[in-house]
Image (cartoon, grey):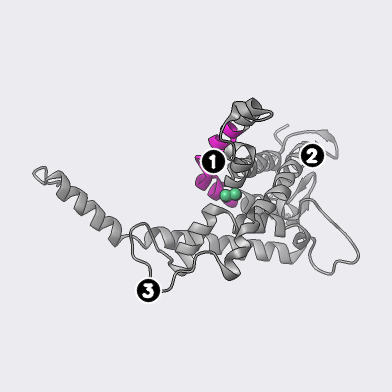
């Protein structure tokens, strides 16, 4: 039963204490989620098989490069792009610094005693994020092409459950990529006066679009991570004959 006689500052103190007591929940959930994805994605990339089913191509293997000189799974020719883009993403950096090295574990929760060096030395590679952005944008186009190709079966136009899975996948990854902080800076965040620069109106509109996705960047980061793994799994299971892809049209 709530104590209605408790003063407001006392209730705030109580909530703050509760939050500090439960600080480990978010880092633990983040750590488990990221670890599970990394394990599945690494396995899915290594097997190098069952990545195609009818008109469906797993996003782990897209675009598909089948070349004689490459001894490993074709997934490794492409996964460095989404992997590098996510690993250096500003949101994921916060998430895995907290989850895996507890540095710091949560807002206003003290970090373990250590010397803080910032993102210097080996962590300087995090600055590569802005460069990963360009191939990541190209990947969005490629994933939409894959989604469109998923409408074309050997017997003509159609829609299967896999078609819908691939369309959702392209949309989720587009929403994650379009909310990138580096993209926001690139399209308009670095402009002080839109009416003073070339294409100012267009850049302002583009900045508003990126800002729209950026507001929910964390959400899109998780939704797209889950869905890209699910998409690979769905296509894998269809390809292995474990499940049958339902044709809607
Ligand atoms: S900041 Fe997250 S993708 Fe760029």
Q: Main secondary structure of the magenta part?
A: helix
Q: Is residue 91 left or right of residue 2?
A: right
Counting other residues with Cα less than 10 Å from the Cα at mark 1, is it few (<14), some (14-19), or many (20 or more)?
A: many
Q: Is residue 167 magenta?
A: no
The residue furthest left is: 5
Q: Estimate the x, y position of residue 113 in percent, counting from the top left.
A: 37, 74
Q: Is residue 215 magenta?
A: yes
Q: Which residues are magenta?
A: 207-226
Q: Secondary structure at mark 3?
A: loop
Q: If you read the primary sequence from the N terminus, does the residue marked by circle 1 or circle 3 appear first?
A: 3
Q: Nearer the viewer, residue 181 or 37?
A: 181
- Residue carrying label 1: 214
Q: Is residue 61 left or right of residue 21?
A: right
Q: Quadrant of residue 116?
A: bottom left
Residue sitting at x 33%, y 62%? 109
Label 3 or label 2, whichever lies nearer to me, is 3
- Residue carrying label 3: 113
State how far apart marks 3 and 2 are (Cα). 53 Å
Label 2 or label 1, whichever lies nearer to me, is 1
Q: If you read the primary sequence from the N terminus, does the residue marked by circle 2 or circle 1 appear first?
A: 2
- Residue carrying label 2: 149
Q: Secondary structure at mark 2?
A: helix
Counting other residues with Cα less than 10 Å from the Cα at mark 3, is it few (<14), some (14-19), or many (20 or more)?
A: few
State how far apart marks 1 and 3 are (Cα). 33 Å
The residue furthest front is: 196
Query: Is the Cβ of the residue at disc 3 closer than 8 Å to that at disc 2?
Result: no
Q: Nearer the viewer, residue 142 or 86?
A: 86
């Amino acid at each position: 039963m709530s104590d209605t006689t408790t003063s407001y500052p006392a209730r705030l103190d109580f909530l703050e204490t509760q939050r500090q007591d439960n600080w480990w929940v978010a880092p633990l959930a983040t750590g488990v989620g990221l670890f599970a994805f990394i394990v599945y994605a690494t396995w899915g990339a290594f097997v190098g098989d069952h990545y195609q089913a009818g008109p469906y191509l797993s996003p782990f293997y897209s675009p598909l490069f089948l070349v004689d000189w490459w001894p490993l799974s074709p997934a490794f020719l492409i996964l460095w792009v989404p992997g590098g883009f996510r690993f250096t993403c500003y949101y994921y950096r916060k998430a895995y610094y907290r989850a895996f090295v507890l540095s710091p574990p949560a807002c206003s929760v003290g970090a373990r005693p250590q010397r803080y060096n910032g993102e210097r030395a080996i962590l300087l590679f995090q600055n590569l994020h802005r460069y990963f952005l360009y191939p990541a944008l190209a990947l969005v186009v490629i994933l939409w092409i894959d989604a469109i190709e998923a409408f074309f079966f050997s017997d003509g136009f159609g829609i299967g459950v896999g078609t819908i899975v691939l369309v959702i996948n392209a949309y989720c990854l587009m929403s994650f990529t379009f909310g990138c902080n580096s993209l926001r800076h690139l399209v308009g965040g670095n402009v002080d006066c839109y009416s003073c620069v070339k294409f100012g109106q267009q850049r302002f509109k583009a900045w508003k679009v990126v800002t729209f996705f950026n507001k929910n960047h964390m959400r899109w980061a998780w939704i797209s991570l889950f869905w890209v793994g699910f998409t690979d799994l769905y296509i894998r299971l269809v390809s292995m004959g474990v499940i049958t892809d339902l044709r809607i049209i």
